Image (cartoon, rainbow, N blue to C red):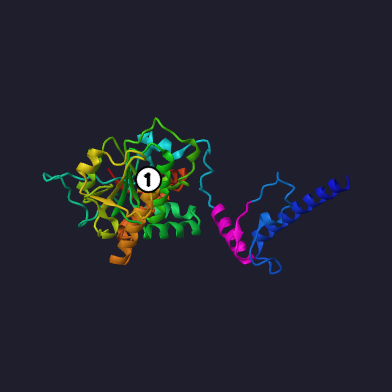
Amino acid sequence: MTTSSSSSSTFLLLRTSLSSFKCTLRTTPPSLSALPHAFSLSSLLPHTHSGLKVASRCYASAQEAASIHYKDEALSTDPIIEPPEDQSKDTVEHLLTNTDDVARLMKMERRSAQIQSDGRAEPNSPNRWFPYLDRFKCENAYVRSSEILEAVSPCISDARRERFRNVVQNRSYSVCLVVEGLSDFGNVSAAFRSADALGVQSVHVVSCDSSKRYRENRHVSMGAEKWLDIELWDSAKECFKVLKSRGYRIATTHLGMDTVSIYDLDWSYPTAIVVGNESRGISDEALELSDLHCSIPMKGMVDSFNVSVAAGILMHHAVCDRISRTGCHGDLTLEESQILLAEFSLRHSKSAVSIVHDYAKRKPTSMKF
């Protein structure tokens, strides 16, 4: 009985201490020099109380912990940040099986490439493709990217706006990813996450097998799909025709005699990286229609990577090669950067679109039809 009473007292004391600690972090930077140099809140918990769950995030110092909590607080005060999504939904799977929802994800009006007699299109600038026009449709009027930013920016925290600017600065359409015939949505999600992390804005999905679903991989993408331009295709032929019209060369990953090492390619040239099904690989149609076959040199007993790992390696090397050759990966012009920044601002939350529509009604100088 004494042990139980002592344990309960310790538990109550711990709860009180943690609450006080949290309040201190949210008000003024505390003097926490008495704590160890590296600590985790979970290390303060008695191991006997398994029912109490506290985030086990580690910090290099108490000062870093305070700083990070301040940043989190700044983000949490954003008035139009969406509430957490329903965790029972697989967002990537839903998008890939609902074409209309994918189209609605992209807000700014998109450019339509005119295919020439030689099968190619005249891009908006030499050897570069950028998909958006500088206008967003609001009922009977258009608004420009500058107007969108003017309308939405006051409703987005400074930290969030700075994050958008940094991301856009490192975005590029010069490399895009194509996943063909994948049956595991977890692999698609992982590839999307890598594309977002590496600054590859454009991703394409060819005939994803929606009959095979892996629910345990539900949250692998970490929400990356919200910030990417996703296009769905019924066949490799249709996808490749459009990509070639936009100025891309098609590089399919393949193990064969005619393959080129990824380390021998010039990735400063606009390139669409194609990865194939988990077991069958790239389809014969895609291999025949591609401009070149490339491979990742293997040094072990196995002769292939997991498809999402291979996609990550390919994109990472492409970005590194582009930086070594051109000095940077992000290559958007100032105008394109502003348009993509407006696109991100519109995707920021469901409220953002409503705010811009209201702004357009009040602003008579918006472009009319």
* Location of residue 248 in the rendering, given as x and y in whole percent from the top left corner: 23, 51
SS under mark 1: helix
What's the residue at 18%, 44% (across, down)? 114
Residue farthest toward the right in the current orientation of the protein: 2
Residue plotted at (77% across, 50% down): 11
Q: Is residue 241 visible from the viewing direction of this image?
A: no
Is residue 65 found inside the magenta-colored segment of the image?
yes
Q: Residue at x 38, y 36 (%)?
A: 183
Task: Indicate the position of residue 356 as horizontal and vertical percent values.
Answer: 41, 47
The range drawn in magenta is 55-77
Main SS of the magenta part reads: helix
Q: Position of residue 118 (x, y in %)?
A: 11, 46
Question: Which image quadrant is residue 209 in?
Answer: top left
In the depicted structure, whether residue 98 falls above or below residue 18? above
Instruction: Name the image quarter holding the N terminus.
Output: top right
Crowd tier of the residue under label 1, counting other residues whose Cα lies within 10 Å: few below 14, some 14–19, many 20 or above? many
Q: Is residue 116 visible?
A: yes
Q: Position of residue 90 (x, y in %)?
A: 47, 37
Q: Which residue is mark 1?
A: 307
Tell me the quarter of the image containing the C terminus.
top left
* Extreme-left residue of the structure: 117
Question: Going by the image, does 193 lie left or right of 141?
Answer: right
Q: Amino acid at mark 1?
A: Val
Q: Residue furthest top?
A: 211
Residue 30 as seen in the image, left or right of residue 151: right
